Image (cartoon, rainbow, N blue to C red):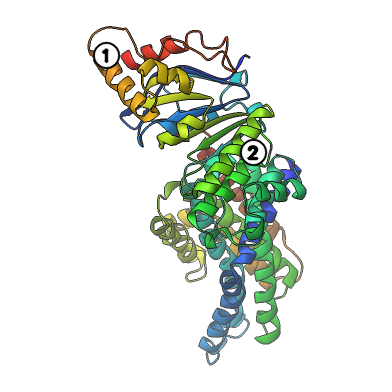
Amino acid sequence: MNARILAATTGRVLRQLRHDRRTVALLVLVPALLLTLVYYMYADQPTPPGQPSMFDRVALVMLGVFPFVIMFLVTSIAMLRERTSGTLERLLTTPLGRLDLLFGYGIAFGLAAAGQAAIASAVAYWVFGLTTAGSSALVIVIAVVNAVLGVALGLFCSAFARTEFQAVQFMPVVVIPQLLLCGLFVARDEMAGWLQAVSDALPLSYAVEALQEVGAHAEPTATMWRDLGVVAGAVVLALALAAATLRRRSG
Amino acid sequence: MDHAIAVRDLVVDRGRRRVLHGVTCAVPRGAVTGLLGPSGSGKTTLMRAVVGVQTVRSGSVTVLGRPAGSPALRSRVGYLTQAPSVYADLTVAENARYFAALHGRGRAEADRSVADVGLADAAGQLVGSLSGGQRSRASLACALVGEPELVVLDEPTVGQDPVLRADLWARFHALAAAGTTLLVSSHVMDEAARCDRLLLIREGRLVADDTPDAVRAAAGVDDLDEAFLRLIRASEAAAGQDDGGPGGGGQDDGGRGGGQADGLGRAAGEGAAS
């Protein structure tokens, strides 16, 4: 890796994003609009005594999951474009290293996700009165780590898509099972054993557990740090797999 | 180290199809070498092998004294792909600055390379909003911005108006005069006459490897288009009969290519006969 090339690549990805005003607007507005939807959905639902309200439960998980889903989609399309437009082939003939490219995407979209998470959290906490026992800063940290996980998986999955149609189809394949099994709909310890085992193997389960820890405890817990570590490990694994798909020579 | 590029018995398969059938050729330093041939003849595959992104089955490609694709070559070789490979959602200047940064060059060099391809007025425009010809010039600016020693250009003049085409060729020769080696592909024969040296490739085999004058002399006609046609006919006939290849047998004008021609004419014959 080379600091100058990494910085140039990060800047280039962010500049591409900046020129796409509509995407920027969607990144900023959609989470806030969906939070509004969730707020009114649960507005009249009774809260069981001694438990967080449904809105608090769902909004907290949404804040962490949203950057993961969006950044997965954005990255897989961006990387697919690099592959199909010939820019990737050209980049691989320059001094740019594979990790410069992968980390460039990770940092650029990670920064974009940080901005998105900050705005969405501000709306959730200040407009809709989300309450968490722990700090909102931790919620944003977890959201950003999730976003980077989305980027890493997107970089990897784009290698298996030839067209943008195929690339968007990876969203339901990669994201929805993780969403269903992460413990939001059915608590993980109430699932059938084999489903629990699958859930244990999916990184989003740990991300959601980390968020729930922040929701329930004033101070960061050991479980939360361990969960965050697992998600970070999944990021490293996905990046390593993505690097393996970036071949300088092809047929 | 006497040639910028030395290709030896290069065989390349793409899928199940053999695209290059044992090509042997050499590209002299500090000259413009034209890679001519119809679409689908293997020009792009040969260029990809030179820049080190093509998987090869057998044979060797040596570039600036090192195996093609060596990490040390990446800052010394510039590559223009056939389809303009620039970011459509960045401006011309932003594209040039990014590729400049990859080669350790600054904004000034980037802006100069944009001006050099005649896009100074469009520097602030998004590449996606440009015409096809402008887009391919933006891509060219990105290939030249690192001031590489070897420039590999896949059909750089497609879609350019005649005046710009003449400007680009003048620039290629100016670069060559300053010591840069250029390998330029084209499927338009009138561009062949502008090259210092020619490689004619057809169906994955080398049909000629010589100077334009020597190609004309070998075929006995002044028109390069006609000369190529005769060489192709002759090589097809030779392939059916014996090893006596066409290609002018190492005739050379004694210019830049002088002393490097040995074996090249023969190689053309071998390429055609294998």
Q: Secondary structure at mark 1?
A: helix
- Relative placement, left or right, of B240 versus A119 is left
Looking at numbered disc 1 in the image, what kind of residue is underneath it? Answer: Ala
Judging depth in this view, the residue of B135 and B250 nearest the camera is: B250
Q: Is residue A228 visible?
A: no
**Image quadrant containing the C terminus of chain B:** top left
Which label sits on residue B130? none
Q: Chain of mark 1?
A: B
- The CA span between labels 1 and 2 is 45 Å
**Image quadrant containing the N terminus of chain B:** top right
User: Is residue B53 positioned above or below A67 on the image?
Assistant: above
- Image quadrant of residue A217? bottom right
Identify residue for label 1. Answer: B239
Q: Is residue B212 visible?
A: yes
Q: Chain of mark 2?
A: A
Residue at x 61% of width, y 26% of height:
B70
Nearest-to-viewer mark from 1 and 2: 1
- Image quadrant of residue A203? bottom right
Q: Position of residue B201 (x, y in %)?
A: 39, 26
Identify residue for label 2. Answer: A97
Q: Position of residue B101 (x, y in %)?
A: 71, 45
- CB within 8 Å, label 1 to label 2: no
Q: Position of residue A97 (x, y in %)?
A: 64, 38
Looking at numbered disc 2 in the image, what kind of residue is underneath it? Answer: Gly
Judging depth in this view, the residue of A68 and B167 nearest the camera is: B167
User: Is residue B249 positioned above or below B57 on the image?
Assistant: above
